[in-house]
Each structure stands twice: as C-alpha cells, then as structure tokens.
Amino acid sequence: MESLVEKGLTKSIGLSNCNSKQIQRIYDNAKIKPTVLQVECHAYFPQHELHEFCKKLNIAFTAYSPLGCPGFPEFALKDWGVKDLEKPKVLEDKILKEISKKYDKSPAQILLRYLIQRGIAVIPKSSNPKRIKENIQIFDFSLENEDMNQMKSMSCGQRYITMTYWKGCEDHPEYPFKEPF
C-alpha cells in the first residue's frame, strides 16, 4: 500500500477490523502511517477505548454498521446458513426510542447523530431512497449531554460482525476480535 501512495495511485492508507495491538504494530513499522480505521461501531458496541487509541495516533475512526446491522440476520441466514442470530436489536432499544421521540427524529437518526457528535464518521448501508435521505438529515440538531450519556449507557458489548460464519477464521493468528480493543 505504501508504494501505491508513493506512486500517487492512492492518497492514504486505511485499516479495517484491526485491534489496538495490530494497529500499533502497523503504525510502528509503517513508513506511511494509516490515516483511518473502519470498524463496527454503534450504541451497543461503541468502541470507546479503540476510538481513544486511534485519536492518540491521529487515525480517523469510521463506523460501519452504525445502526447495529438490522439487515444482517436475514442476509447471514440466506447466504451462509448462520442460525445463531438471536441478538438484541439496537433500533428497538427503549432508551433510543425515548430519545428519538424527544427530538422528533427516527431511532436511526439518533444513532447516527450520537456517533457524529463523538467525532466518528458513519457509513450506514441502505438501498431505500427514503432511508438514505433520512440518514443525511442529522445535521439540523444536536443531542444534549444528558442524552449522549443515556446513549453511552446503552453499551452492552454486543458485536454483530464476528466473521465466525467463515469457518475457522477465529483460529487464525491475526483474528482481530480476541483482544479487548
């Protein structure tokens, strides 16, 4: 990747699904430092420690599945035959619904705004034009500190994307999700 930057074929180097030890090892050995990390991040899995770690290294933080991966169960079941999908749904959380009523916004908009206010870039997936438009309409309000704290209290360590649906991946020495952050 560094040679691609040197040749002007890309502007910067990004990482995805790395833990703090992997990031530090790459950072310490890279001539051209990574500029962004993309990981699963949402109210149930807010990645506070990893986010702070990246800030110290001046690595931008990008959240995939910022809505808690609402379409994943059907996708995983259909494409990979994954059966163990009974996980709590962030979009149905009671705290989230109360906050969304207060601001007259959808639960998805509150989830996205929460991450944006934390300084995290978000990349929600949607093919629905109405939801795409709704996902953009998050810059006309701010969450109050009390609501940010309530959102923070939703953290329960619920990771949705473990990649264990690919048999044997968790046995790989570089499987990233064995470390606390």
Image: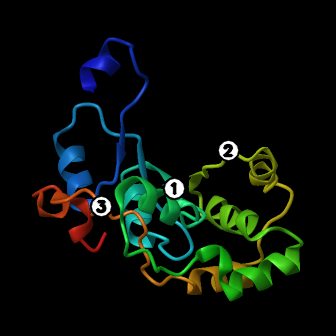
Query: Which one is earlier in the sequence, the residue at label 3 or at label 2?
Result: 2
Query: Which one is earlier in the sequence, the residue at label 3 or at label 1?
Result: 1
In this view, which residue lies farthest toward the right? 104
In the image, which disc is placed on residue 165? 3
Front-lying residue, 117 or 161: 161
Q: Residue at x 36, y 48 (%)?
A: 16
Amino acid beneath label 1: Ala
Q: Nearer the viewer, mark 1 or mark 2?
A: 2
Q: Where does residue 59 sit, x and y in percent of width and height?
A: 41, 48
Residue 38 appears left or right of 94: left
In the image, which disc is placed on residue 127? 2
In this view, which residue lies farthest toward the top? 7
**If the image is split into quadrants, where does the C terminus sit?**
bottom left
Would you name the residue on which mark 1 appears?
Answer: 63
Could you tell me which secondary element the residue under label 2 belongs to?
loop
Amino acid beneath label 3: Tyr
Q: Residue at x 84, y 68 (%)?
A: 105
Could you tell me which secondary element the residue under label 3 belongs to?
loop
The answer for how far apart the CA atoms under marks 3 and 1 are is: 21 Å
Residue 161 appears left or right of 6: right
Q: Residue at x 58, y 65 (%)?
A: 70
The answer for how far apart the CA atoms under marks 3 and 2 are is: 24 Å
